[in-house]
Image: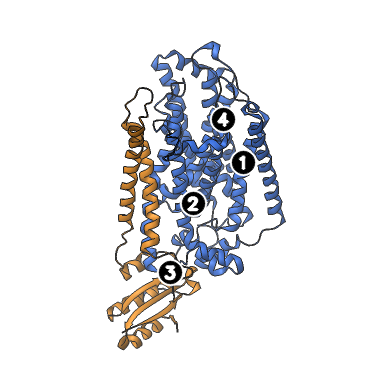
């Protein structure tokens, strides 16, 4: 059984110290809500790497195929002959393939982000403190029942306002 | 970054203050712009009801103000992606204060540009013929035509720019939500999709943002290249040149950067955010304008060299017609404003003076509109056979629609800056020191 304990910090260095101490004590860090994507904090928390890139790749490849073979199939199927050029002419289809690679890749990136980060929701996930969108940091710890008191102590000692 | 030291709190406070309810002057300006847009709408309606004869278009100049203005606005759109994507990849920190305005400008400029092929079409409702979809008429667009590539390029550019813009806005919309009340809180809450700034979401967000920047970068190059092929793929003298793609891209960035400075100057003054968007930011853009101006000058010179060196008499004739023919005034306006005037930015005095920045950037954009005028009109007016030559002058209807396009652009822009954070709070905060107590315990 784990207990979620969170504390709101006014200082970045203090939240970093709390993360380190929590990890040393074997307490899991759930996440940190922070005003900007801070590299040091992200490294300290060490989440799994994002797989948005994979979704982008799938989108980009789909766009490439649709953009190249879509016009090609239309030209072949309907016999679209223009200016005596080959019906399936590669150079013009490279342009449509290029554009659709970008279009599908970008759309997939946005869709991938919304999906993987589970971003579409009505209101922020709890616990949340409105000060994090300005200059505060909210550290959320997942502590085992027997570690709960220790987790609370770490947060308090580092100057956090422990949330009820 | 300025005289006043910025803190996370002051950045939020100062930028969110720009969203406070607007005063009477704002609504008066909005009303004036709506009137001009309405007037342009009436011009379009008159053209539809009367026919294309009300425009100055005729043989041999069948492309005029509408296509010139289309290319102009697509060009303006360019620096938005340059600043937001390319400079992001190069880690140019100064972009943080200006990229939101540049991105918004991109979207509004593309929305403006997109109107012109429709207006030029005359029968606007026939536009769907260009869209590729299986239909019972058994008709397909010609995928070998640069005009169809244009549809793909411009619509991709609009869609990707819009998504990139929205992605950058999400954390700022959440900040606006957390400080707003009433309907604004609901609106920002809905738009920010419950963003909670958690490290897991930031992790995905940063990755997606980087990918978007990487994807959007080739788009900067491709869109205006495709627009240039509308001309270069034909055999008209003065158009059929391989330099057109890079020449158009450089010109587009040149005019786009100039427009960002023109827009940024009144915003920082009116909203009192001169300590966030400093003269240094404007100066950095002015430096890039010097580079793009030199590239544009080089392109002009290369066109002349190739015309002379190729021995092609029609090419030589058009390049003699441009500086000495009927439209010489337009040609010299173009050369002076696009290549000579920007060189003033070589002097620090001109780069750091708000007045000179404003005047020079406006002149550059006048010059860039005339560049498209010179390219399009002179080549069509003076092609292969002397008996087919003819001149073009825009009609009042075309002037009305041109004025309407500027009003439409500024209207969208004014609505944006009062309802959305016009400077990225998140990215400005990323380049200033975070709140620290001092020393990790």
Residue A47, which numbered label? none
Return the x and y of residue B43 as percentages of the image width and height. 66, 35
Label 1 neighbourhood size at 10 Å, few (<14), some (14-19), many (20+)? some
Viewport quadrant of the C terminus of chain B: bottom left
Graded by Cα atoms within 10 Å as few (under 14), some (14 to 19) or many (20 or more), the crowding at tag 2 reads: many
Q: Is residue A131 visible?
A: yes
Q: Which residue was labeled with disc 1?
A: B406
The alpha-carbon separation of the residues under discs 1 and 2 comes to 21 Å
User: Crowdedness of circle 4 by 10 Å Cα count: few (<14), some, many (20+)?
Assistant: many
Same chain for the residues under marks 4 and 1 in the image: yes
Q: Which tag is nearer the camera, tag 4 or tag 1?
A: 1
- Callout 1: SS: helix
Residue B372 x %, y %:
53, 30
Residue A72: quadrant of the picture? top left
Marks 4/3 in contact by CB < 8 Å: the verdict is no
How far apart are the alpha carbons under marks 4 and 1? 15 Å
In the rendering, which numbered label is found on residue B370?
4
Q: Residues within 10 Å of mark 3 (few under 14, many from 20)?
A: many
Q: Is residue A143 left or right of residue B113?
A: left
- Which one is earlier in the sequence, the residue at label 2 or at label 4? 2
Chain letter, colour blue = B
């Amino acid at each position: 059984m784990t207990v979620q304990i969170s504390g709101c910090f006014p200082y970045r260095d203090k939240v970093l110290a709390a993360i380190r101490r929590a990890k040393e004590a074997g307490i899991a860090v759930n996440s940190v809500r922070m005003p900007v994507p801070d590299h040091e904090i992200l490294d300290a928390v060490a989440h799994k790497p994002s797989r948005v890139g994979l979704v982008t790749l799938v989108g980009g490849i789909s766009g490439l195929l649709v953009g190249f073979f879509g016009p090609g199939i239309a030209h072949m199927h309907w016999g679209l002959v223009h200016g005596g050029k080959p019906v399936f002419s590669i150079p013009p289809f490279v342009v449509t393939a290029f554009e659709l690679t970008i279009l599908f890749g970008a759309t997939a990136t946005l869709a991938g982000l919304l999906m993987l980060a589970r971003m579409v929701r009505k209101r922020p996930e709890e616990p949340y403190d409105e000060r994090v969108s300005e200059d505060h940091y909210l550290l959320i710890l997942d502590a085992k029942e027997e570690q709960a008191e220790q987790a609370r102590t770490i947060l308090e000692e580092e100057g956090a306002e422990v949330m009820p | 970054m300025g005289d006043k030291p910025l803190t996370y709190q002051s950045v939020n406070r100062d930028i969110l203050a720009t969203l406070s309810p607007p005063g009477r002057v704002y609504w008066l300006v909005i009303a004036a712009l709506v009137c001009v847009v309405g007037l342009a709408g009436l011009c379009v309606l008159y053209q539809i009801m009367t026919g294309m004869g009300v425009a100055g278009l005729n043989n041999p100049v069948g492309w005029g103000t509408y296509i010139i203005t289309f290319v102009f606005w697509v060009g303006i759109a360019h620096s938005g992606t340059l600043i937001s994507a390319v400079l992001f990849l190069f880690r140019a920190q100064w972009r943080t204060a200006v990229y939101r305005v540049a991105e918004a400008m991109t979207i509004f400029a593309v929305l403006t540009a997109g109107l012109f092929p429709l207006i030029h079409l005359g029968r606007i409702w026939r536009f769907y013929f260009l869209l590729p979809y299986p239909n019972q008429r058994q008709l397909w667009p010609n995928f070998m035509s640069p005009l169809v590539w244009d549809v793909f390029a411009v619509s991709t550019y609009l869609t990707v720019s819009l998504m990139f813009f929205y992605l950058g806005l999400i954390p700022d919309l959440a900040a606006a939500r957390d400080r707003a009340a009433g309907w604004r809180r609901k609106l920002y809450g809905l738009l920010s999709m419950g963003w909670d700034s958690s490290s897991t979401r930031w992790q995905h967000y940063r990755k997606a943002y980087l990918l978007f920047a990487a994807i959007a970068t080739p788009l900067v190059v491709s869109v205006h290249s495709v627009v240039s092929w509308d001309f270069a793929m034909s055999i008209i003298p003065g158009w059929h040149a391989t330099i057109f793609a890079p020449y158009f891209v450089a010109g587009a960035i040149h005019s786009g950067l100039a427009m960002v400075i023109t827009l940024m100057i009144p915003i920082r003054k009116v909203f009192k955010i001169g300590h966030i968007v400093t003269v240094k930011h404007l100066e950095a853009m002015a430096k890039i304008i010097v580079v793009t101006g030199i590239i544009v000058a080089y392109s002009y010179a290369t066109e002349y060299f190739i015309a002379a060196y190729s021995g092609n008499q029609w090419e030589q004739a058009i390049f003699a017609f441009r500086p000495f023919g009927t439209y010489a005034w337009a040609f010299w306006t173009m050369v002076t404003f696009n290549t000579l005037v920007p060189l003033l930015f070589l002097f620090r005095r001109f780069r750091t003076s708000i007045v000179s920045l404003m005047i020079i950037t406006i002149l550059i954009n006048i010059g860039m509109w005339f560049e498209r005028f010179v390219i399009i009109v002179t080549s069509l007016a003076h092609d292969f056979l002397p008996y087919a030559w003819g001149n073009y002058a825009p009609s009042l209807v075309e002037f009305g629609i041109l004025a309407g396009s500027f009003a439409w652009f500024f209207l969208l822009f004014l609505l944006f800056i009062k309802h959305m954070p016009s400077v990225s709070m998140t990215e400005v905060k990323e380049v200033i020191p975070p709140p620290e107590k001092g020393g990790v315990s």
